[in-house]
Amino acid sequence: MADRKIMNRSALAGVAVPGALGAQTGDPGVRIHEVTDFAAMSIIARRGRVTDVAAVLSRHAGIPVVDASKRAGNGTLSVTGTAPGQWLALCRGSDAAALLDTLRNDLNGLAAATDQGDGRVVLEITGSRARDALAKGISIDLDAIAFKVGDAAQTSTSYIGLQIALIDEAPTFEIISARSTAESLWSWLVASAAEYGIAVA
């Protein structure tokens, strides 16, 4: 029997090709980067242990993690509230899986933790027209006054469920969605951002 090897493949392999798309009228207004080197884990606190779980997550993230729709991160590990008593932990880099294993061990007895990395696509969208492009299909207020750094929301666009958070003032948005809808999400994003010019990293 032939020896089969399983290889990691990004959700948008062959689709999110580095280069320029859309209008070519100067500096691109939208920059898109697919994060490919990551591991993710959903966390659901056991009854009565929400405060304890938040404390463990805060220790690992290096900043306070709350039981709310907020994103807290330290560059390597980010934790985003997805529902009451529930979070999604996302770790980037070559040691991502090992770091999440350590977190899982510290949550033993406090929460249910389930690997999610293989089922997600993670995109970063930034640029001077990023808000304008995303606002075309995401039905929450992304204005700088209403959606601030650390804010997060569970929402949808073009019938695609997603999690969106604002990472920094650039602005840089982080979008996490199901891997199964990655190409549909990409098509919507490119169509929405085309008039502003797109740089794919």
Image (tube, rainbow, N blue to C red):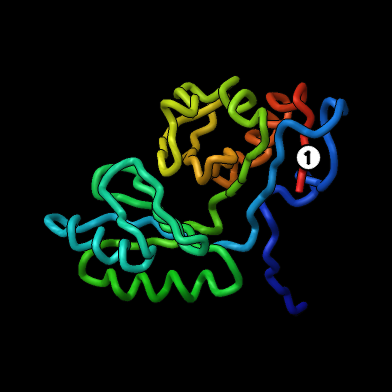
Q: Which residue lies furthest to the left in this view?
A: 48
Residue at image coords 70%, 59%: 9
Horizontal and vertical percent position of residue 112: 29, 61
Q: Quadrant of residue 154?
A: top left
Residue at image coords 49%, 40%: 166
Q: How crowded is mark 1: few (under 14 residues within 10 Å), some or many (20 or more)?
A: many
- Is 70 displayed left or right of 3 in the figure? left
Residue at image coords 45%, 41%: 149
Work out whether residue 51 can be spotted: yes
Residue at image coords 42%, 74%: 101
Q: How many marks?
A: 1
Indicate whether 117 appears above or below 81: below
- Is 128 displayed left or right of 169 in the figure? right
Q: Quadrant of the N terminus?
A: bottom right
Q: Which of 47 and 1 is in front in this view?
A: 47
Q: Nearer the viewer, residue 57 or 137?
A: 57
Horizontal and vertical percent position of residue 56: 27, 66
Q: Mark 1 points at which residue?
A: 199
Work out whether residue 175 can be spotted: no
Horizontal and vertical percent position of residue 77: 46, 62
Q: Which of 149 and 16 is in front in this view?
A: 149
Horizontal and vertical percent position of residue 186: 68, 36
Name the kind of residue labelled 1 in the image: Ala
